[in-house]
Image: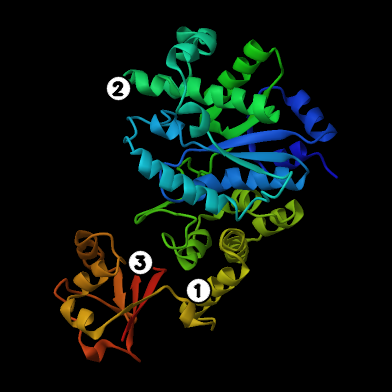
Amino acid sequence: MANIYDVLKERGYIAQVTHEEEIRELLGREPVTFYIGFDPTADSLHVGHFIQIMVMTHMQRAGHRPIALIGGGTAMVGDPSGRTDMREMMSAETIAKNAEAFKKQLSRFLDFSEGKAIMVNNADWLLNLNYIQFLREIGVHFSVNRMLTAECFKARLERGLSFLEFNYMLMQSYDFLELYRRYGCRLQMGGDDQWSNILAGVDLIRRVEGAEAYGITFTLLTTSDGQKMGKTRAGAIWLDPNKTSPYDFYQYWRNIADADVKKCLALLTFLPMEEVNRLASLPGERINEAKKVLAYEVTKNVHGEEEARKAQMAAEALFGSGGDLDAVPTTEITMEEYRRNSNVIDLLYSIGFIPSKGEGRRLIAQGGLYINGERVDSIERQLTEQDLRDGSLLVRKGKKAYHRIVVK
């Protein structure tokens, strides 16, 4: 079996490492306990987290033991990494609710049975810390001068960095130390924006325990022009099917730029690299075949094979190749609701197909809104029972965002 480090490197995951040769030798020699942290700042994981989940899955399949660390404690402070402003403070109740949602989602991707993956919450040790004891045991090992040179802090100094956020690096480092003590965890992994925090944790274990620890960061999910992936006009692309439907999830990957196909196939699917390279090298219009494979495989990984198949068939139904229109995202309303919201903007806003009425007016002004294949040319457009086809409307915004409204 290939060394998992080589697999991760070939697929393009690895951005930075603390001790490359030592890590590669260690991963090839014995099972290694490693961890990745997830701060529960929302009630669902999103596609930005999916890189981390894929890495954990690759590592577990290679015989290593993942620790999924839910940041119930660190989320009380907020990570300043990659931020130009302070995160909104969340209540303990909201954080606890989000943490439970994260646990449920992560359990779909990793094997948490006996001796396999571990899931823990850093609230278990962070929330009851004695502040003076923490400063004496942990704070003494941190140089403020060195901390201020870290990328996660430098960008914030001009705008203002709160003392609350300044503690985040100490807390994340302490997490690594706790996991080393409790589970023999020797490797921390995370997105490349976590490099400074990971380095601090590696150094803390060396200073406090006199032991070797290691860190790896991986590529952030960005487009070829450097923009973060997983955002649309409507918001983030979530892993929760109630927040982003499997069809919309499928369509997001089906419509990515040609230049991003190879990266996404390598990072977000388990297809062999030979197949990734073959698909990514398809010429001209045939690159759309690769996008269909990408969309199906990523949707299958996140939502299961049945939902991936339904999303694929819905796309085929809408774009002229046959398929099952019943799989198109659908909202059912009563005839009373339909009549009450007879203005097209009111109706689409009421079902959540447009985020605001202003967005609806903009779409119509730009010629980007269609009902049953016909362009809506007025913001005053009123819907009647004559618009219903077999009791439903098929709505489209832009080129490929479809929704069916069934009136009962």
Quick one: label 2 or label 3, which is nearer the N terminus?
2
Q: Nearer the viewer, residue 156 or 367?
A: 156
Task: Tell me the residue at 67%/56% (across/down).
Answer: 281
Quarter holding the C terminus is bottom left
The x and y percentages for residue 147 are 47, 14
The x and y percentages for residue 229 are 48, 47
Residues at marks 1 and 2, CA–CA distance in whole angstroms: 46 Å
Residues at marks 2 and 3, CA–CA distance in whole angstroms: 38 Å
Which of the 4 image quarters holds residue 280? Answer: bottom right
Figure check: 407 above or below 187? below
Q: What residue type is labelled 3?
A: Gly
Write down the residue under mark 3: 398
Task: Tell me the residue at 50%/56% (across/down).
Answer: 256
Q: Which amino acid does label 1 sit on?
A: Ala
Residues at marks 1 and 3, CA–CA distance in whole angstroms: 15 Å
Mark 3 element type:
loop
Write down the residue under mark 2: 159
Q: Is residue 229 visible?
A: no
Q: Which amino acid does label 2 sit on?
A: Arg
Write down the residue under mark 1: 315
Q: How many marks?
A: 3
